[in-house]
């Protein structure tokens, strides 16, 4: 998973939005609990923002250079698919720099 170290090179910010209690947000909450520390260790100065709000649909947002943003709805995705979605967003960031 070499892409984990590429976060700060290809993105400006990563935001996760989810509800603290809804079943639809359970995989996103679990993803944060299991992966946040590792992602921050590999990208210590990179902003990974966690936004909890009652009733919100789970979402993942990536911000790139020049204010370009891409969002993904996380409802129905497993933790593994959330990791894959972040990996894809990192690849998009690399292609935007070309």
Image: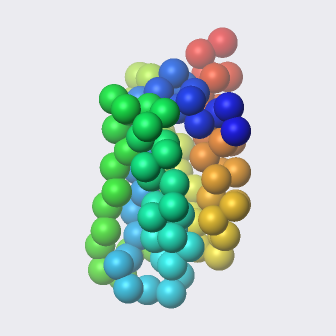
Q: Quadrant of residue 43?
A: top left
Residue 77 visible (yes or no) = yes
Residue 47, compared with residue 57, is above or below; it is above
Q: Quadrant of residue 65?
A: top left
Quarter containing the C terminus: top right
Total count of labels: 0
Q: Residue drawn 49% across and 45% down?
A: 38
Task: Determine whether, in the image, residue 29 is placed left or right of residue 20.
Answer: right
Left or right of residue 98, residue 21 in this image: left
Q: Is residue 34 above or below residue 15?
A: below
Tell me which colouring the rendered structure shows: rainbow
Up-down: is 11 above or below 58?
A: above
Residue reaching furthest to the top: 98
**Residue 45 horizontal/vertical position (percent):** 33, 29
Q: Looking at the picture, does residue 60 appear above or below residue 68?
A: below
Determine whether, in the image, residue 64 is placed left or right of residue 90: left
Tell me if residue 63 can be seen: no
Residue at position x 29%, y 73% in the image: 53
Residue at 38%, 85% in the rendered image: 21
Tell me residue 69's x, y (percent).
47, 39
Where does the image place residue 25, in percent across and percent down from the top left?
Answer: 49, 76
Residue 58, position as x, y percentages in the image:
48, 69
Q: Which image quarter holds the N terminus?
A: top right
- At horizontal 46% and vertical 61% (from top left) the residue drawn is 32
């Amino acid at each position: 998973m070499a892409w984990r170290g590429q976060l700060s090179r290809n993105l400006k910010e990563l935001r996760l939005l989810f509800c603290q209690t809804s079943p639809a947000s359970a995989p996103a909450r679990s993803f944060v609990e299991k992966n946040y520390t590792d992602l921050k260790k590999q990208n210590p100065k990179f902003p990974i923002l966690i936004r909890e709000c009652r009733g919100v649909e789970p979402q993942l947002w990536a911000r790139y250079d020049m204010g370009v943003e891409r969002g993904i709805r996380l409802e129905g995705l497993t933790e593994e698919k959330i990791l894959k979605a972040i990996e894809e967003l990192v690849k998009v960031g690399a292609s935007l720099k070309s």
